[in-house]
Image (cartoon, helix red, strand yellow):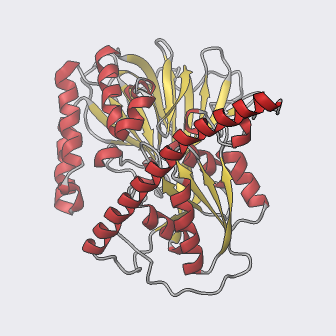
Amino acid sequence: MTDNSAATPTEPTTGRRAAVIVHPVKADVAALRVQVEAAEHEFGWEPSEWFETTPERLGDELAEDAIANGASLVIASGGDGTVRAVASTLAGTDVPLAIVPAGTGNLLARNLDIDVLDLRSAVWIAFGGITRHIDIGRARVERPDGSRESYVFTVLGGIGVDAGMIANTSDALKKRVGWVAYLDGIRKTVLGGAAFHVRLKFDEGAPRSTRAQSVMIGNCGVMPGGILLLPDARVDDGALDTAVMRPRGFIGWLQILHAMSIQSGLLRHSEFGRKLVSENRKRVRALSYVQSRTVTFRVTSDPEEFEIDGEAVGEVVAGRVEVVPAALPVKVRDPEAPQEHVFSRVTRLVTTDIEGRVNRAIQQAQGLVAPVQLGIRGAAGAVTGAQTTDASDTGVSAADDDTTVAGATSATVAEPIAPDAAPTPLAGDAAGPDEVAVGTDADEAGDGASARA
């Protein structure tokens, strides 16, 4: 893991100030402040401006404030929803996004090789890393009632099993066991979910109809647990990678899981191994991959749940997804920076974990004492006729903006999903010749060959 702690301290430089947008429930704000202040001193930055998300003001609006105030860097600390909201504002600007992961999935952080367990390392990357421009995805979806909305995503969007998994995962379970909670959501979705019928169109190719359990459209492919969902996806290749899952029963799911376990293993780190993985994919008839710049879909059965970056955003009947190349500047680790010795890193992480546990225990104890003090104060106030204390004076919000969709744009302005006039149906409604390797209703097993549109 990269550690830039060897950087030479400098005097603060006027104009180099970061903005920190933090989800107060997800992140350990006190610990984050300690690391940010240390990094400011180490790399010669002025004191950062701090923002906390609330239900009324999410990450996208706070990022707008940060830019207006002249921030040279915006650090997002929270879950995938917070990161995506901030990214939706920074896309197309020259202000880079830095991620200090504090959520369940931490999808973009994993794909940028940011250690989701090392707070100090993530902060050091924010101030001492290099800037890299990555692609983003833009999805315009149609609701069952005909209304339309637009979303930005950094990792993936999809319908079917992945969206159902998110909708079926307990928030309480996520808080207890982290991303492992999604396994329970997968179990519920796979056992209870039925295949849906969908028409797909990639770029300017002919539309195809198929029956699927899941259609996932990704900008990058690494999921929690090191699972490589989209083996050819790169965050800066100017393309989207789509996985279409069409298993026929339990055996089909086993084939998909086996293929993913192979492509997620050590084989993918060598040229020979990647060739073996590619050949194995061709034999898995339940799983197809397509690479393109745009994907248009229409669900021809019942409406399906749609998700973006691990967040369920409701049912849709159609959508158009496109890649916006090199739109988002992000901070990543500097490959030329000195590497931290493994033993030193383990020692530091253990020490940090112990300190964090102690601080949390103190905070919990204070939380138990505060109500008692408030009760005594209230009783005394009742006796003397004093005014009772308003609980809002604490200034603490338990709002979770990761369950609120930020960056969604209501389609009150006529904005067609298809590149045609607004009244025109979404592309994919017309029949056409076979041009992409996605199975049809007549061939549910499909052709497992990886297609390149």
In this rendering, position of residue 268 left or right of residue 207:
left
Q: Is residue 335 visible?
A: yes
Look at 74% across and 52% down and name the residue there.
64
Relative height, residue 333 to residue 415 (above, below)? below
Look at 25% across and 73% down and name the residue there.
343
Q: Is residue 413 visible?
A: no
Look at 23% across and 48% down and name the residue there.
263
- Where does the image place residue 271, in percent across and percent down from the top left? 21, 62
- Where does the image place residue 107, in percent across and percent down from the top left? 43, 47
In this rendering, position of residue 146 left or right of residue 186:
right
Location of the N terminus (image quadrant): bottom left
Location of the C terminus (image quadrant): top left
Identify the image quadrant of residue 436: top left
Relative height, residue 75 to residue 161 (above, below)? below
Instruction: Return the residue found at the far top.
Output: 302
Look at 44% across and 21% down and name the residue there.
198
Q: State the count of labels.
A: 0
Relative height, residue 3 to residue 412 (above, below)? below
- Where does the image place residue 169, in percent across and percent down from the top left? 40, 27
Q: In front here: 90 or 446?
A: 90
Q: In front here: 427 or 45?
A: 45
Q: In front here: 29 or 244?
A: 29
- Where does the image place residue 347, in percent across and percent down from the top left? 29, 69
